[in-house]
Amino acid sequence: MKSWNRYKRGFDLVALVLGHLLLSPVFIVLWTVIPLWIWLEDRGPVFYSQNRVGRNGRVFRIRKFRSMVVGADRLGPAWTIHDDPRRTRVGRFLRKRGLDEIPELMSVWTGDLSLVGPRPLNEEEHATMIREIPDFDKRLSVRPGVTGLAQIYNRSDDPYSKLEFDLNYIGSMSFALDMKLIVVSVWYSVFGKVDDRSSRER
């Protein structure tokens, strides 16, 4: 891995600060309206949290806006399927635009996540992929990300393709590539194309 990847932590913090300063009215509205909307639908918890496997196998806690019914883990797998019936009406709207992932920015602040990198999997799914796919753990050589090559371009969510995209990113990461992936992610969010894949993790 190239030594210049050290740019990433500084890039993440600068991007977060500038983004929140320039878009503060937007973030204020999102952090106010979304939690209220989730609570009004079923009076359940606003947030969903889960352990994820991060860099070098370190487990950390991730938080998202809840997009599924309360107790969804007991009703099916820890990842969603196409047209998952466990999703709430609010959740379907949020997932199409990636708005459920806004709380993940708190994990970027703490350093558990980067803005761009391989998607962190839950412990159960990660253990399964390690057993079934050679070298799958190589994804863990860098800090995982909110968005990335696999999140954007692996539309089938196939795990073999996920590994290929993630290793491609690790081998070619740069400031320019990160900027491009963030811009594409924002574009997908605005036009509701974030959740177009046939399946997706929670």
Image (spheres, rainbow, N blue to C red):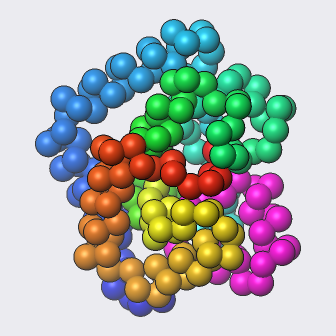
Q: Position of residue 71 (x, y in %)?
A: 76, 26
Q: Position of residue 72 (x, y in %)?
A: 75, 31
Question: What residue is drawn where x is 33% and y is 70%?
Answer: 178
Does any portion of residue 7 appear in the rendered image? no
152 up-or-down from 38: above or below: below
Q: Position of residue 32 (x, y in %)?
A: 35, 20
Please state if 144 lies on the left or on the right of 114 as rendered.
Answer: right
Question: What residue is drawn where x is 70% and y is 46%?
Answer: 81
Q: Which residues are magenta?
A: 117-142
Residue 130 included in the magenta stretch of the image = yes
Question: What residue is drawn where x is 55% and y is 23%?
Answer: 89
Count all numbered tags in the image, as a single digit: 0
189 up-or-down from 7: above or below: above
Relative to the observer, which residue lies in front, 6 or 41?
A: 41
Relative to the observer, which residue lies in front, 79 or 60?
A: 79
The quarter of the picture where residue 78 lies is top right
Residue 100 included in the magenta stretch of the image = no
Question: What residue is drawn where x is 60% and y is 9%?
Answer: 43
Does any portion of residue 2 appear in the rendered image? yes
Q: Position of residue 77 (x, y in %)?
A: 79, 44
